[in-house]
Image: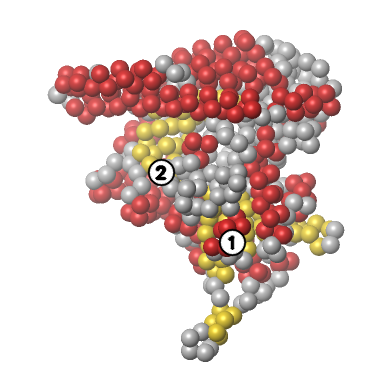
C-alpha cells in the first residue's frame, strides 16, 4: 500500500524502507575478530545517500557486526524473517564486495525474492559471468560500479517515478536476456554527498570507524581488484568524517580505507595539518591506521606529519620476501631494501602491520622453483629482521576481474568452482594448481605455520611480565610520556600477539571440522593434479 488515511481523514504516503545487508562470512576466519568491531564504509556511504531521496528510510544490517539484541535464527545468524516482522523492508540491497560472502548473499536474496521483495546487489564481485549468476540466485538488479547516485535513481524506479532502462550503471534480466545499461562515469565530486552516517547501522557496535578520501589506485597490481586513476575528495571532507564520528559517538579509533595513503602528497600534508589542529582544539588524541606504500618511509616530512596527527599504525603490503616473486608481482624493491625501509617506519615510532602473499604463481614460462619449507624460512627470517608488530599471510586468490585470475584461467590452473565455491575465496584456501614443487596442501600448511610461529601462547606470560615491570616507570620521572609510551607499546604488542594466537588457533580448529580437505582432493582429481 502506497497510501493510508491520516487522523484528519486525508491520505498520506507511507514512507518506504531500503534495507542494506552486509552478508556474513561463511565461517570463522582470521578477519572475524576485526569484523566484529568495524564495518564496511561502502554500504554505509550508499545508505547515507538515501537520506536525500524523498519518502525513503534506510537501515544497514552488518551480519558480521551484529549484537545480541538483534533476532537470530537457529544457526546464530541474523533472522531476516523476524527483521521483516519488526520493520518491513520494501527493497533490499546486498553488498557484494567480498567474494567469500556471496553464497550467503544469494541465500538471502532468494529468501527476500520469495517474499516478493525487490532485491539489488552491487560490489566488485559482480562483473562478467557473475551478473548472470546473480540473476539465477535471487537478485533482480545488479549495480555496476559505485552506488551513491545509482541507488537514488533506482529508488525512483521502485517508487514508480522513472524507468530502469534509463538508469546508468545497472544490469537486469528482461525475459532470458541480460540487459546492461550505459556505463556510469566514476564519481569525482564527493563533497556533494552527505557525510557517512553510522547511526544507520542496526544492532551493531563500532569501535573502529572506517573513513576515506581517495578512491582508486594507480599501482595496477596483477592480484588486486582496485584499479583506476585515484580520485580524491577534499581534505576537509575527510576531517569532517572524523569530526562527525568523534562528536556524535566519542569514537577515537579510525581506519582510513584509502588503498594507498599519501597518493596525493601535498593535499595529504594539508589534511594532516588540519587533523593535528583539530585534535589540539578538542584536547583529545585519536588513534588512526592507514594503508601506505613501503617507499613512503623515505619521506621524512610525511612521516613526521603523520605522527603529529595521531597516525600510529601503518599497514604495508610487503607481499613477499622472495626476489623472484617480487619481480613477478612487478614490485621494484629488493628484500634487503624493504627491511631498511621498514626500520625507518619503526624509528619514526609506527606500529607496522605487514601483509604478505605466500606462493605467488610465476608467469607462464617461469623457471623459479622453491620448496614450501624453504619459502617458509624466508618469510620467518624476513618478518623477524623487519621487526613487524603484526603480520597477515594469505594465499594468492584468483579474484574476479583481476589479471591474476585471467592468467591462471588461461593456463587452466584454477580448480573447479563447483567444488571449491566462492565461500573459499578469502585468502586462506588454495584455489589453483601452484608452481612445482609446491602442493595446495603445503601452501595452506605454510601460512598456518608462519602465523602460528609469530602469534604464540608464550605472549600471555609476557603480559604478566609487563605488569610486573610497570613500577619501572619510576625511572622515567624525568619524562613520563616516553616511559609510558615504551611500556604501553610492549603491553599492546603482547596483548595483540596473544589475541592473534587465539584467533589462529580457533581458525585451525574450525578448519579441521569442515570438509575442505575432501573437497580439495576432489578438485585436484577433476583437474588431473596428482601431486
Q: Nearer the viewer, residue 473 or 461?
A: 461
Residue pictured at 47% horizontal, 48% vertical: 68
Specify the quadrant that holds the C terminus: top right
- CA neighbours of label 2 inside 10 A, class few (<14), some (14 to 19), many (20+): some
Question: As drawn, which residue projects farthest toward the front?
Answer: 74
Q: Which of 527 and 45 is in front in this view?
A: 527
| Label 1 packing within 10 angstroms: few (<14), some (14-19), many (20+) | some
* Residue drawn at (60%, 55%) of the image: 80
Of labels 1 and 2, earlier in sequence is 1
Identity of the residue drawn at 77% across and 48% down: 133
Residue 340 bears which disc, if any? none
Relative placement, left or right, of 456 versus 243 is right
Q: Is residue 360 above or below residue 226?
A: above
- Judged left or right of residue 208, residue 16 is right
Task: Determine whether, in the image, residue 46 is placed left or right of residue 268.
Answer: right
| Residue 355 in the image, given as x and y percentages of width and height | 53, 27
Give the residue at the far left of this rendering: 478
Question: Can residue 147 be seen in this snapshot?
Answer: no
C-alpha distance separating marks 1 and 2: 27 Å
Identify which residue, 112 or 475, lies in the foreground.
112
Q: Where is residue 485 in the image (x, y as percent from the top left)?
A: 27, 27
SS at mark 2? loop
Res. 207 mark: 2
Residue extending farthest bottom: 9
- Image quadrant of residue 400? top right
Total number of numbered discs in the rendering: 2
| Residue annotated with mark 1 | 84
Across and down, in percent, residue 162 comes to 67, 72
Amino acid at each position: 500500500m502506497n497510501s493510508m488515511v491520516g487522523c484528519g481523514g486525508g491520505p498520506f504516503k507511507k514512507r518506504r524502507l531500503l534495507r542494506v545487508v552486509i552478508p556474513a562470512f561463511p565461517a570463522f576466519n582470521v578477519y572475524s575478530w576485526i569484523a566484529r568491531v568495524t564495518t564496511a564504509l561502502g554500504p554505509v556511504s550508499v545508505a547515507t545517500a538515501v537520506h536525500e531521496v524523498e519518502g525513503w528510510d534506510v537501515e544497514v544490517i552488518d551480519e558480521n557486526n551484529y549484537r545480541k539484541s538483534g533476532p537470530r535464527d537457529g544457526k546464530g545468524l541474523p533472522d531476516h524473517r523476524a527483521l521483516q516482522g519488526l520493520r518491513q523492508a520494501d527493497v533490499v540491497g546486498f553488498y557484494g564486495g567480498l567474494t567469500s560472502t556471496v553464497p550467503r548473499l544469494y541465500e538471502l536474496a532468494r529468501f527476500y525474492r520469495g517474499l516478493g521483495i525487490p532485491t539489488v546487489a552491487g560490489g566488485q564481485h559482480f562483473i562478467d559471468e557473475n551478473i548472470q549468476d546473480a540473476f539465477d540466485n535471487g537478485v533482480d538488479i545488479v549495480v555496476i560500479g559505485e552506488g551513491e547516485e545509482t541507488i537514488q535513481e533506482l529508488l525512483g524506479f521502485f517508487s514508480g517515478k522513472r524507468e530502469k532502462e534509463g538508469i546508468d550503471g545497472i544490469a537486469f534480466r528482461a525475459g532470458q536476456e541480460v540487459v546492461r545499461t550505459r556505463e556510469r562515469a566514476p564519481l569525482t565530486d564527493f563533497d556533494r554527498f552527505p557525510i557517512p552516517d553510522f547511526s544507520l547501522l542496526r544492532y551493531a557496535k563500532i569501535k573502529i570507524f572506517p573513513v576515506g578520501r581517495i578512491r582508486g589506485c594507480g599501482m595496477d597490481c596483477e592480484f588486486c581488484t582496485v584499479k583506476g586513476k585515484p580520485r580524491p575528495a577534499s581534505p576537509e571532507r575527510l576531517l569532517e568524517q572524523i569530526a562527525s564520528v568523534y562528536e556524535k559517538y566519542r569514537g577515537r579509533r579510525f581506519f582510513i580505507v584509502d588503498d594507498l595513503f599519501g597518493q596525493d602528497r601535498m593535499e595529504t600534508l594539508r589534511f594532516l595539518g588540519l587533523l593535528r589542529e583539530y585534535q589540539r582544539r578538542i584536547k583529545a588524541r585519536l588513534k588512526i591506521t592507514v594503508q601506505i606504500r613501503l617507499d613512503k618511509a623515505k619521506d621524512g616530512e610525511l612521516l613526521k606529519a603523520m605522527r603529529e596527527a595521531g597516525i600510529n599504525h601503518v599497514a604495508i603490503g610487503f607481499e613477499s620476501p622472495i626476489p623472484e616473486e617480487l619481480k613477478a608481482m612487478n614490485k621494484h624493491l629488493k628484500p634487503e631494501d624493504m627491511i631498511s625501509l621498514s626500520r625507518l617506519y619503526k624509528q619514526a615510532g609506527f606500529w607496522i602491520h605487514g601483509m604478505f602473499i605466500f606462493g605467488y604463481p610465476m608467469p607462464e614460462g617461469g623457471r623459479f622453483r622453491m620448496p614450501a619449507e624453504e619459502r617458509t624460512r624466508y618469510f620467518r627470517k624476513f618478518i623477524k629482521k623487519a621487526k613487524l608488530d603484526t603480520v597477515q599471510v594469505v594465499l594468492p586468490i584468483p579474484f574476479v576481474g583481476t589479471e591474476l585470475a585471467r592468467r591462471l584461467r588461461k593456463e587452466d590452473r584454477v580448480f573447479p568452482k563447483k567444488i571449491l565455491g566462492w565461500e573459499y575465496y578469502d585468502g586462506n584456501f588454495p584455489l589453483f594448481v601452484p608452481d612445482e614443487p609446491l602442493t595446495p596442501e603445503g601452501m595452506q600448511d605454510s601460512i598456518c605455520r608462519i602465523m602460528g610461529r609469530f602469534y604464540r601462547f608464550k605472549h600471555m606470560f609476557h603480559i604478566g611480565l609487563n605488569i610486573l615491570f610497570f613500577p619501572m616507570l619510576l625511572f622515567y620521572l624525568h619524562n613520563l610520556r616516553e616511559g609510558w609510551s615504551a611500556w604501553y607499546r610492549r603491553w599492546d604488542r603482547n596483548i595483540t600477539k596473544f589475541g592473534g594466537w587465539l584467533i589462529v588457533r580457533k581458525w585451525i580448529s574450525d578448519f579441521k571440522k569442515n570438509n575442505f580437505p575432501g573437497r580439495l582432493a576432489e578438485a585436484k582429481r577433476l583437474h588431473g593434479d596428482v601431486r
